[in-house]
Image (spheres, rainbow, N blue to C red):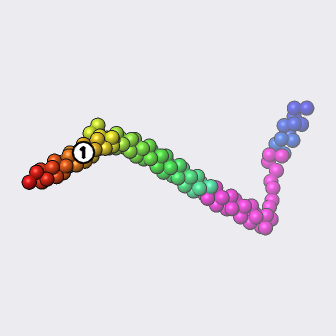
């Protein structure tokens, strides 16, 4: 039994397959098409990899810009003396002082 299986395997492995010229050309063309597809896929893969790297760099730059903007906001934040209510108080006191001065000047003119 073992001899029969061994003979069958040898006959199948040693048998020669003859292809016609057309079949050989078809196989050659199929191999070339597959190689072109592999090349295009590898090119697309490398382009996608580059695109991902560029997007990661862009994200890192945006995060850095965000941190810098937050720092700038802290630096540009108005001081205590730049308060709008303080400016209102300055304006009120100045207006009162000018009106009081004009009133005193008016009384001084009426004396003469």
Label 1: how many Cα within 10 Å (few below 14, some 14–19, many 20+): few
Dot 1: what SS? helix
Instruction: Residue lying at the far bottom in this picture: please name it.
Output: 22
What residue is drawn where x is 53% and y is 49%? 52
The range drawn in magenta is: 12-40
Q: Position of residue 46 (x, y in %)?
A: 55, 53
Image quarter (top left, top right, bottom left or bottom right) of the C terminus: bottom left
The residue sitting at the right extreme is 1
Report the residue at 80% width, 61% height from top: 19
Q: Nearer the viewer, residue 29 or 49?
A: 49
Q: Quadrant of residue 66?
A: top left
Residue 1 vs residue 108, the one in the foreground: 108
Residue at image x 89%, y 37%?
Answer: 4
**Where residue 32 appears, x then y in whole percent?**
67, 62
Main secondary structure of the magenta stretch: helix
Q: Is residue 34 left or right of residue 105?
A: right
Relative to 96, is 28 on the left or the right? right
Find disc 1 in the rendering and name its residue.
Answer: 96
Is residue 35 in sight in this rendering?
no
From the top left corner, tell me how far across and down residue 27 is, in percent.
74, 61
The quadrant where residue 1 appears: top right
Image position, residue 82 (x, y; %): 29, 42
């Amino acid at each position: 039994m073992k001899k029969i299986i061994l003979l069958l395997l040898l006959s199948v492995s040693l048998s020669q397959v003859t292809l016609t010229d057309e079949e050989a050309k078809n196989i050659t063309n199929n191999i070339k098409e597959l190689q072109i597809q592999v090349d295009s896929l590898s090119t697309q893969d490398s382009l996608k990899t580059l695109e991902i790297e560029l997007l990661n760099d862009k994200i890192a730059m945006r995060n850095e810009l965000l941190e810098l903007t937050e720092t700038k906001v802290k630096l540009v934040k108005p001081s205590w003396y730049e308060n709008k209510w303080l400016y209102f108080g300055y304006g009120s006191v100045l207006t009162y002082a000018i009106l009081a001065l004009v009133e005193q000047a008016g009384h001084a003119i009426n004396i003469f």
